[in-house]
Image (spheres, rainbow, N blue to C red):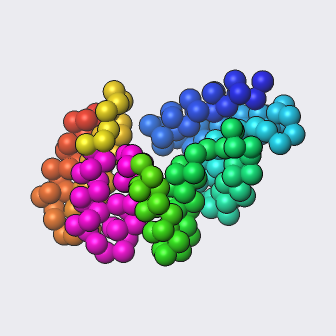
Amino acid sequence: DWIAIQTAVGALLSRAKLSGDYNDYARAERALTRAFRVAPEGSGPVSTRASLNFTLHRLPLVGPDLDRLEALPATLRPIPRELALRRGALALEQGDYALARDLLQSSVDAKRTVPSASTLALWFWRTGDFDTAQTLYQEAFGRYHGRDSQPVAWLHLQLGLLDLDRGRWDDAMTDYRAASAAFPGW
């Protein structure tokens, strides 16, 4: 069934993010195609497909899937703050900074999570407010309580890139070393 296939796609996407191997993304995409073939009309792994397309920067394909998610019955629809976060991230990548700010801020206001804080941090970074971006990334650290160390490494990487953008070479190296220590070999 399509739900089992979606689970396999999730594993392939996780591995692709770890390895950077495009073959895993291609396998995930083939599996998604299979899942939609067997899914009843109006169902299927829409959210997963939107995530894959966002990851691969196929931005024009993301919006229609977000529209499909929003059109689902209320019991199946993602919660509004998650849709706002996804739409805000899409708007940011498409260069609509005003819309991105509104959507991302509404997601953060609804519930401060690692993804909402870090995506809003990216908005501030891209608009030149490095201090607020750094504060939000630091907040994201405080909100993460999982066992997986990859998100910790990713947050350190983001801080390192932010420091690099600010010309803070030593701080960037400290962040990169912390990322490497949190998740060696990544």
Q: Please state, as top left, top right, bottom left or bottom right, where the C terminus lies in the image.
A: top left
Residue 21's place in the image compared with 170, above or below, is above
Q: Position of residue 68 (x, y in %)?
A: 74, 51
Q: Give how far across and how far down residue 56 sits, in percent.
A: 58, 53
Q: Nearer the viewer, residue 147 or 111?
A: 111
Q: Quadrant of the N terminus?
A: top right
x then y, percent, for residue 173? 17, 53
* Dominant SS in magenta: helix
Q: Residue at x 48, y 68 (%)?
A: 102
The relative height of residue 74 versus residue 128 in the rendered view (above or below) is above
| Whole-percent x, y for residue 143 in the image | 30, 41
Residue in the picture at 32% in, 38% down: 144
* Residue 91 is covered by the magenta coloring: no
- Of 94 and 143, the residue lying toward us: 143
Is 139 placed above or below 26 here?
Answer: below
The residue stretch that appears in magenta: 112-141
**In this rendering, does residue 164 appear at all?**
no
Q: Residue at x 40, y 66 (%)?
A: 123
Q: Is residue 114 visible?
A: yes
Taking the image as shown, residue 163 lies to the left or right of residue 28, namely left
Quadrant housing residue 23:
top right
Left/right placement of residue 45 relative to residue 124 reads right
Residue 89 in the figure: left or right of residue 147: right
Nearest to the observer: residue 138 or residue 52: 138
**At x 44% / y 37%, what residue is drawn?**
18
The number of numbered badges drawn on the structure is 0
Asked where in the image residue 39 lies, by quadrant, the reply is: top right
Farthest-out residue, left: 170
Residue found at the very far right of the displayed protein: 41
Give the camera-side residue of 18 and 132: 132
